[in-house]
Image (spheres, rainbow, N blue to C red):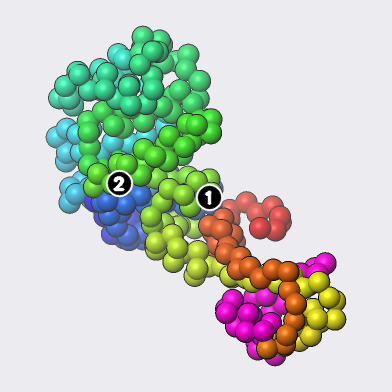
Amino acid sequence: MITLRGLTKRYGEKTVVDGLTFAVEPGKVTGFLGPNGAGKSTTMRMTLGLDAPSAGEVRIDGKRYEDLRFPLREVGALLEAKALHPGRSAGKHLLAMARSNGIPASRVDEVLATVGLTDVAGKRAGTFSLGMGQRLGIAGALLGDPGVLMFDEPVNGLDPDGVRWVRHLMRSLAEEGRTVFVSSHLMSEMQLTADRLVVIGKGRLLADAPVDEFIAGNSRTSVVVRVPAPADLRVLDQRLRALGAATETDQGELLVHDLPVHLVGDAVHELGIRVHGLTERTASLEQAYMELTASSVEYGTGVAA
């Protein structure tokens, strides 16, 4: 488990992480989201002892990272895939990591096989593509078979098969009871991968909730009704507005907000209107995220979500 209590980081007069308090629990994939400049990378760096907090604390299974005797056995992390000696082969890079933390050398071959790099174990890591570098970084995180894992943009540079592989890996690690903390900008992937979300903006905690609750609490569920007769569409529109719905019409479709689908169906039945479709449209994680973080974006573009 990763536990943050009042974690704060200031650079001069600028506060980049502001009193964060939350827990990343074992047995779940926790997604860590926020706009650029929100403080995600700084938070992860403080968790790993790479930056010192200005206030507050962060613990990994009750301990500070710097107090762990063999840290790679307890927490594995991928923050920067290219943070390695470019002249070393992939195998020797991992072997050096293993020796420094008392990890059996046999683990090197095991994790190389896990990430699909066995055939390039002797190749210099500095020649790797971005995707291969990501896989090597993931291998390094897995090397000590730790109970806590942290990944910053783990699918960066990977092809669709690689993205799907990472998704399966994250889920399987959580199912084994490990703590999995993942930062990503890919909302569609987080919706498929994460059990829980922690969202920050301008260094402050905006949300800490299961994915489904987060989406439901930060978006509007709509009902789409396809009505072939324009006159019927107008009648239905008036009835639903009278029931408190907000509506929009578009080429034979009525988009209904703020009214449950069963009440929309009841209105259609009571009016005896013929429809060609009645469908509930649930918001995506991306829509909910954009709604929540709209006022926390560091560099706005004016583009509607």
- How far across and down, in percent of the image, does residue 305 sit? 66, 58
Q: Quadrant of residue 247?
A: bottom right
> Tag 2: Cα neighbours inside 10 Å, few (<14), some, or many (≥20)?
many
Q: Residue shown at 27%/54% (left/top)?
A: 25
Q: Earlier in the sequence, mark 1 or mark 2?
A: 2
- How far across and down, in percent of the image, does residue 197 sit? 41, 57
- How far across and down, in percent of the image, does residue 117 sit? 38, 19
Residue 228's place in the image compared with 57, above or below, is below
Task: Give the left or right position of residue 24, taking residue 119 as reference.
Answer: left
Label 1, secondary structure: give it: helix
Q: Nearer the viewer, residue 143 or 39?
A: 143
Residue 208's place in the image compared with 228, above or below, is above
Task: Give the left or right position of residue 295, taking residue 180 as reference.
Answer: right
Label 2, secondary structure: give it: helix
The reply to whether residue 283 is visible in this rendering is yes
Label 1 with label 2: CB-CB less than 8 Å? no
User: On the image, numbered disc 1 is attached to which residue?
Assistant: 187
Amino acid at pointer 1 = Met
Q: Which residues are magenta?
A: 242-269
Q: Nearer the viewer, residue 55 or 101?
A: 101
Amino acid at pointer 2 = Ala
- How far across and down, in percent of the image, does residue 77 sit? 33, 36
Reply yes or no: does residue 265 show up in magenta: yes
Q: CA distance from mark 1 to mark 2?
A: 19 Å
Q: Which mark is residue 292?
A: none
Q: Quadrant of residue 105?
A: top left
Task: Give the left or right position of residue 63, taking residue 201 as reference.
Answer: left
Residue 186's place in the image compared with 302, above or below, is above
Reply yes or no: does residue 107 show up in magenta: no
User: On the image, numbered disc 2 is attached to which residue?
Assistant: 174
Q: Residue shown at 22%/42% (left/top)?
A: 147
